[in-house]
Image: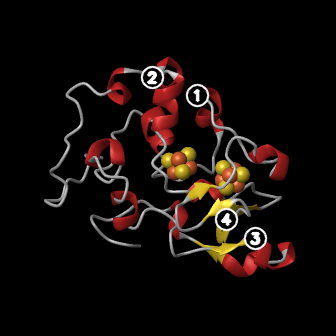
Amino acid sequence: MAPLIPDMVTRDRPPKNPFWREKTLAEMTVDEWESLCDGCARCCLNKLEDADTGAIEWTNVACRLLDEGACRCRDYQNRRKTVPDCVALTPQSVQTLTWLPPTCAYRLIAEGRELYWWHYLVSGDRETVHQAGISVRGRTLSENDVAVEDLEEFIVSWPGEEPEEGSRD
Ligand code: SF4
Ligand code: SF4
């Protein structure tokens, strides 16, 4: 799908040959790899897996370490001490993880697709991921406030959906 480029995003155009078009995920430097994250925090939502089919259901219940306003991990460097099952993305794991959101920059690049207009590397503005309704900001509860046995009550579909232009799904 071609990137959606509304009139609002005309500043700080990306470089002509940006690294994410020139390199594979495995070829990126550590800094390039880290910078590819769009800051949506969709991957920090709790998911439920059907034991029989393996199907993934998203919930709007966020990891206890997520700063919901900033959409950032509160302790990224040491997160595994608090959340041992936090999955680290690698060029290899991106190829196999079935639950990565369809909007995830790593998934898009792995599939040979373009970043969306709201990715800050394209827009030049870290707020556009929020303005476009892609991030989880304003849409989550903390897992500190929801019992594990109640997670099914919080199943939502929007983290697994692709965005429409300029809208909040
Ligand atoms: S879903 Fe992908 S792009 Fe969004 S926060 Fe997670 S790793 Fe970053
Ligand atoms: S530990 Fe941090 S990076 Fe991992 S899921 Fe939780 S908030 Fe996200």
Q: CA distance from mark 4 to mark 3?
A: 16 Å
Kindly state the secondary structure of the residue where label 3 is placed: helix
**Quadrant of the snapshot with the C terminus:** bottom left
73 left or right of 112? right
Q: Which one is nearer the viewer's eye here, 17 or 74?
A: 74
Mark 4 / mark 3, whichever is N-terminal: 4
> How packed is label 2: few (under 14 Cα within 10 Å), some, or many (20 or more)?
few
Front of the two marks 4 and 2: 2
Q: CA distance from mark 1 to mark 2?
A: 9 Å
39 left or right of 112? right
* Residue 143 circle label: 3
Place of residue 103 in the rendered image (x, y in percent of width and height, measured from the top left) = 45, 52
> How packed is label 4: few (under 14 Cα within 10 Å), some, or many (20 or more)?
some
Mark 4 / mark 2, whichever is N-terminal: 2
Q: CA distance from mark 3 to mark 2?
A: 35 Å
Q: Residue at x 57, y 55 (%)?
A: 72
Give the residue at mark 2.
24
Give the residue at mark 4.
57
Amino acid at dot 3: Glu
113 left or right of 82? left
Q: CA distance from mark 4 to mark 2?
A: 29 Å
Q: Determine whether label 1 and label 2 are within 8 Å by CB.
A: yes
Query: Relative to 96, does residue 141 appear above or below in the rendering?
Result: below
Give the residue at mark 1.
91
Query: Relative to 97, does residue 32 appear above or below in the rendering?
Result: above
Amino acid at dot 4: Glu
